[in-house]
Image (spheres, helix red, strand yellow):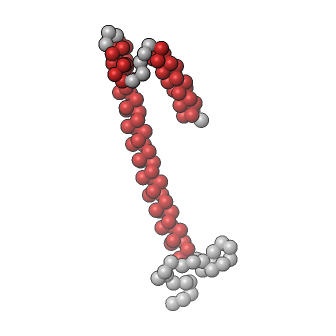
Amino acid sequence: DEKGLALEALSQVSRVRQAWLAERGVSDRASAQRWLQDKPAACDAWFQLENAIQRAVTLNEFNGRHINHGLHRAREALGVLKAAASSMMAYGPDGAQAEVPIGGRHLGSA
């Protein structure tokens, strides 16, 4: 919920910024650079904002890859555990005979 509220606040600020820039004829990077030429403080703030945005994007991509890697490993581990559990059970929770992976043995068959 907190992340959603923060994203909504950022979205609102972005819309206000876009409208403000559009009123001044700034519609792309080239027009922004022309507009900033005689405004050194605004130019510095603009580039600091661009750097912060790029850092946030990079961190978000890194976190996404890290989360996906963790999920993949967890799914693999769960598959191994399920296979091990099913190979040791003669009957499943529903009372039916459990499926045994090929090459496995049923309990009591020696």
Q: Is residue 6 something that shows in the picture?
A: no
- Image quadrant holding the N terminus, namely top right
In screen coordinates, is 29 left or right of 19? left
In the rendered image, the vertical position of residue 10 relative to residue 104, given as above or below: above
Residue 51 in which image quadrant: top left
Q: Nearer the viewer, residue 33 or 60?
A: 33
- The single residue placed furthest to the bottom in the displayed view is 110
In the rendered image, the vertical position of residue 22 relative to residue 69, given as above or below: above
| x, y percent for residue 108 | 56, 87
| x, y percent for residue 68 | 45, 51
| x, y percent for residue 83 | 51, 71
Q: Nearer the viewer, residue 41 or 59?
A: 41
The residue shown at (54%, 89%) is 109
The residue shown at (47%, 54%) is 71
- The single residue placed furthest to the top in the displayed view is 38
Residue 60 in which image quadrant: top left
- The single residue placed furthest to the right in the displayed view is 94
The residue shown at (33%, 18%) is 33
| x, y percent for residue 76 | 46, 62
Q: Is residue 61 something that shows in the picture?
A: yes
Q: Nearer the viewer, residue 88 or 57?
A: 57
